[in-house]
Image (cartoon, rainbow, N blue to C red):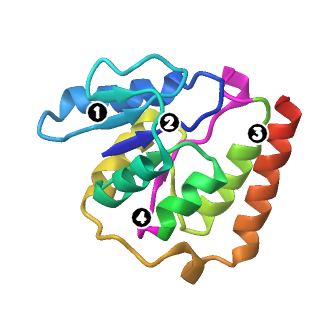
Amino acid sequence: MFVTVGTDHHPFERLIGWAENWAARVEDWEVQVQHGRTRPPRHGIGFDFCSHDRLQELFETSDVIVTHGGPATITEARRLGHRPIVVPRDPRLGEHIDNHQQLFARRLGAAGVVELTETEDDFLAAVVAMSYLPRQRSASEEVPAGVFRVGAVIERLAQRRRR
């Protein structure tokens, strides 16, 4: 399993905690966690950031992908045949500046493009379910490109707002 929180400067303790809880319970899984500016996981293999090439390699070699609600990361996982588990950052918990990840991820979850999880119980159930599913078609075959373009625009606007 590969978990990525992206490059945002806000900590994402909630997702790191869920990933390390899974890694502690299931010892026969290799769990790699790109933790960004959040502390490294106590269980599993943690690293703060990686190159785009390494990210691609992790997407290609992992059976289960867990990601924050960033449109670019979701799109990349989908392009490589994954139906990612998405945990959108929650601004009420100090994980982001606004709710654009929640809105985008909920839209994709409702369309069945991602496995949306916003509680730890849902996260754990999704990891189990996704571990049994083969990779699927690319996102471009299932969701109109406009949905992803809107998500990318929202992400860029949120980044500008942070500056």
Would residue 140 be found to the left or right of residue 17 on screen?
right
Residue 32 locus on image (x, y percent):
31, 37
Residue 153 locus on image (x, y percent):
81, 56
**Badge 3 amino acid:** Asn
Task: Give the quadrant of residue 136.
Answer: bottom left
Above or below, 48 against 121 in this view is above
Secondary structure, mark 4, is loop
Disc 4: which residue: 82
Secondary structure, mark 3, is loop
Would residue 66 be found to the left or right of residue 105 on screen?
left
Residue 145 locus on image (x, y percent):
70, 76
**Badge 1 amino acid:** Trp
Assess disc 4: are there few (<14), some (14-19) or many (≥20) residues with their C-alpha within 10 Å of its C-alpha.
many
Q: Nearer the viewer, mark 4 or mark 3?
A: 4
Disc 2: which residue: 119
Disc 1: which residue: 22
Residue ID at (35%, 44%): 2
Disc 3: which residue: 99
Q: Could you give the CA–CA distance between mark 4 and mark 3, rounded to whole angstroms? A: 24 Å
Q: Nearer the viewer, mark 4 or mark 1?
A: 4
**In the rendered structure, which segment of residues is drawn in magenta?**
80-96
**Badge 4 amino acid:** His
Q: Does the magenta run of residues contain 32?
A: no
**Badge 2 amino acid:** Thr
Report if the CB atoms under discs 4 and 3 are less than 8 Å apart. Answer: no
Question: In front here: 87 or 158?
Answer: 158
Q: Could you give the CA–CA distance between mark 2 and mark 4, rounded to whole angstroms? A: 21 Å
Q: Could you give the CA–CA distance between mark 2 and mark 3, rounded to whole angstroms? A: 16 Å
Secondary structure, mark 1, is helix
Q: Which of marks 4 and 3 is nearer the N terminus?
A: 4
Q: Which of marks 1 and 2 is nearer the N terminus?
A: 1
Above or below, 139 against 7 in this view is below
